[in-house]
């Protein structure tokens, strides 16, 4: 490590950036090399969109469905990498002792969290890119430039609240249990939040319950960009989403305190 | 390979930037709407005038009129209006301009409201759909901004018996079994967003089946409860006998004409006296009797305007004939002659009908039942809102919303010209066929 020792020892802003990017690189590569993570998170939303919005709607009467599903499957596309990366990955590292090992290195906790969030965002960005290409060039969806950017922005920002959910699960659940819990949240929350089937097609009771889930609010915020949401205000969604994220972070913090034995 | 440990972190910032740039580049190449097309670009010009056009105002034809549309509504209708310079004008010579059509009997599932709009049907009165869509559609119909769907008014959840007609479609239905439940049932519908109450009286007799149905006491109680809540009560019947019985119970309207026998002139007069309106749904009645208007309608329209769903439902047939076309059409003739209000409705998307497109068939069927072109068009424009107590639409007059249908030709002399659609406007926005039309499979 002789040659790289010099820059690494200076702990300025540059040091933090470099170590965060390095950790991201390794986190990303290790995720990419884990087919059980990479394949479902990349292919699930893409195949769903391809089937329901492109093939199923081909020759259909309008572009409402492909446009609508672009927003909801986009959110679904970042949900996977976010909660699997944190929920399962973290539980695994904790139970195998890898987390403890990392804590003994000089790497700051911030770099560790950044790397996981960034990895989820990279996977999310790949999904968004493929979905947008399918929508724009296969399904015929046309949006204003500002709408394309807003959609991409909100969808990628969804990585943060979803990572908080993953963090809460990963902080508490055991490695094997985490897989089940994450899958339950992944599928259950997607369905009830209207990411798979438009929310207005669900029974009223389910629409009411959906308000309790971050994915619902993110779905509505993306749908608002294309004017297909249920019509509640942006603040309604942002406030509830913020509150729900805060709860997840508090739950996660409690879990880590327990793990640290403090 | 000189400094393998160093290279990763030196490259990382560039890889990150390159990734961001690639992502932004992707967002820059995605398709945007042509500024000339309505859904995209700057908002289309919604202030305009159709000049020197034959107007059907909801009751009668008035030649050489100008119609001034402003901010989603009709600002003025008259001969030689003093229109401001620079107001975009549509040349109406040789054309007929009428209020957007209103289908008074539909069922709303999937993308049917877009199908409707393409055929000039700008509002539908739904007679049973999932209550879960009502809140959204109520908001949509108040909203004059650009949309790509017809407006919806609906009965929502129908009043039917457990296992009765209406429960077989997979949509969860709240049922009732006794007169005592009626007031609570009606209150729940009102809270849920039903615009009126629709009752099902269907024992399956006309198809030789035995279907559970509400008893007479419960039907009467639902009608009474609806009136107590200041809602209209309409009823599905399939026999003349049930229609007459519903009349005695104080029903406001029938959503089908029967197909089993021709009504007598005396009985028709009773309907007129009671002020009960009838939505005969001849489109579905003749389909049930084994006739089909599908080929005629498809021949008269541009294939690219017909969605797969419209084509499919038009081609569907009933498993076995129910009633006869003549019993239905002759009954409508007598009801109309007696002065009963007849409203146009198709019961789309039931077998043999297509959402939107079948309204043009219904107009011709009403003509076959003795209505003049103006009377048939009134049944499809001013009639339904008047019967259901809705103020803002159905007429081409100052202050009404600018839901418009422009057809090439003179409808007064040839009602079949209704399919020669030259333009449709919803809330003043042009409905471009290219926007809403189905894309053709390769």
Image: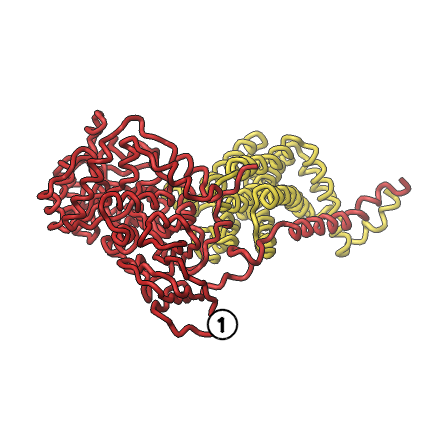
B440 or B151: nearer the viewer: B440
Q: Colour of chain B?
A: red
Q: How far across and how far down the image is residue B111, in percent?
A: 43, 43
Indicate the quadrant where residue B106 lies: top left
Q: How far across and how far down the image is residue B441, in percent?
A: 54, 37
Q: Tag 1, which secondary structure?
A: loop
- Tell me if B199 is positioned left or right of A113 in this view: left
Query: Where is mark 1, residue-wise?
Result: B86
Q: Colour of chain A?
A: yellow
B244 or A148: nearer the viewer: B244
Most distant residue in the left direction: B266
Residue drawn 57% across and 52% down? Answer: A143
Q: How far across and how far down the image is residue B268, in percent?
A: 13, 44
B409 or A257: nearer the viewer: B409
- Tell me if B378 is positioned left or right of B27 in this view: left
- Tell me if A166 is positioned left or right of B111 in this view: right
- Chain under label 1? B
- Residue A77 visible to an observer of this rendering: yes
Image quarter (top left, top right, bottom left or bottom right) of the C terminus of chain B: top right
């Amino acid at each position: 490590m002789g040659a790289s020792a010099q820059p690494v020892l200076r702990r300025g802003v540059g040091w933090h950036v470099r170590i965060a990017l390095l950790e991201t690189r390794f986190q990303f590569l290790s995720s990419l090399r884990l087919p059980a993570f990479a394949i479902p998170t990349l292919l699930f939303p893409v195949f769903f969109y391809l089937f329901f919005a492109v093939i199923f709607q081909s020759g259909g009467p309008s572009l409402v469905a492909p446009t609508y599903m672009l927003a909801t499957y986009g959110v679904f596309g970042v949900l996977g990498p976010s909660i699997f990366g944190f929920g399962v990955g973290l539980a695994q590292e904790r139970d195998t002792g890898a987390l403890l090992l990392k804590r003994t290195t000089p790497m700051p906790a911030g770099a560790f969290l950044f790397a996981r969030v960034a990895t989820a965002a990279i996977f999310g960005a790949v999904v968004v890119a493929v979905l947008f290409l399918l929508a724009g060039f296969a399904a015929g969806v046309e949006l204003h430039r500002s709408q394309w950017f807003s959609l991409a922005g909100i969808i990628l920002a969804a990585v943060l609240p979803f990572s908080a959910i993953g963090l809460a699960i990963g902080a508490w659940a055991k490695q094997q249990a985490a897989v089940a819990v994450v899958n339950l949240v992944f599928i259950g929350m997607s369905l009830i939040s209207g990411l798979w089937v438009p929310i207005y097609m669900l029974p009223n009771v389910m629409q009411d319950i959906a308000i309790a889930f971050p994915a619902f609010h993110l779905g509505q915020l993306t749908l608002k960009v294309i004017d297909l949401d249920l019509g509640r205000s942006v603040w309604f969604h942002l406030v509830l989403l913020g509150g729900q994220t805060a709860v997840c972070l508090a739950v996660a913090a409690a879990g880590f305190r327990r793990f640290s034995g403090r | 390979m000189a400094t393998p440990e160093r290279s990763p972190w030196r490259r990382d910032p560039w890889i990150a930037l390159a990734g961001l740039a690639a992502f932004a580049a992707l967002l820059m190449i995605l398709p945007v709407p042509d500024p000339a097309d309505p859904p995209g670009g700057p908002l289309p010009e919604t202030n305009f005038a159709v000049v020197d056009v034959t107007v059907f105002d909801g009751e009668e034809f008035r030649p050489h009129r100008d119609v001034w549309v402003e901010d989603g509504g009709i600002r003025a209708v008259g001969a030689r209006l003093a229109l401001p310079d620079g107001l975009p004008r549509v040349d109406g010579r040789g054309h007929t301009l009428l209020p957007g059509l209103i289908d008074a009997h539909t069922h709303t599932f999937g993308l049917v409201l877009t199908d409707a709009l393409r055929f000039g049907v700008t509002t539908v009165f739904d007679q049973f759909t999932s209550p879960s869509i009502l809140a959204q559609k109520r908001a949509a119909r108040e909203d004059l901004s650009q949309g790509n769907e017809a407006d919806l008014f609906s009965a929502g959840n129908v009043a039917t018996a457990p296992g009765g007609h209406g429960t077989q479609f997979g949509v969860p239905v709240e049922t009732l079994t006794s007169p005592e439940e009626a007031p609570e049932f009606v209150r729940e519908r009102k809270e849920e967003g039903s615009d009126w109450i629709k009752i099902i009286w269907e024992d399956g007799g006309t198809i030789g089946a035995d279907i559970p149905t509400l008893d007479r006491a419960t039907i009467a109680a639902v009608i009474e409860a609806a009136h107590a809540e200041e809602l209209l009560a309409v009823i599905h019947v399939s026999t003349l006998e049930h229609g007459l019985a519903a009349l005695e119970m104080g029903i406001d309207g029938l959503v089908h004409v029967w197909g089993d026998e021709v009504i007598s002139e005396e009985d028709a007069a009773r309907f007129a006296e009671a002020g009960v309106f009838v939505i005969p749904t001849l489109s579905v009645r003749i389909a049930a009797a084994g006739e089909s208007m599908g080929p005629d309608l498809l021949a008269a329209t541009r294939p690219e305007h017909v969605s797969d769903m419209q084509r499919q439902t038009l081609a569907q047939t009933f498993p076995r004939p129910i009633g006869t076309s003549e019993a239905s059409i002759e009954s409508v003739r007598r009801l109309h002659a007696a002065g009963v209000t007849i409203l146009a409705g198709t019961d789309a998307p039931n077998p043999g009908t297509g959402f939107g497109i079948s309204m043009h068939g219904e107009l011709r069927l009403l003509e076959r039942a003795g209505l003049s072109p103006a009377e048939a068009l009134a049944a499809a424009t001013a009639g339904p809102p008047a019967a259901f107590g809705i103020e803002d639409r159905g007429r081409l007059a100052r202050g009404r919303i600018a839901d418009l249908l422009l057809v090439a030709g003179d409808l007064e002399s040839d009602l079949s010209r209704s399919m020669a659609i030259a333009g449709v406007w919803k809330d003043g926005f042009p409905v471009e066929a290219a926007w809403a039309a189905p894309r053709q499979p390769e």
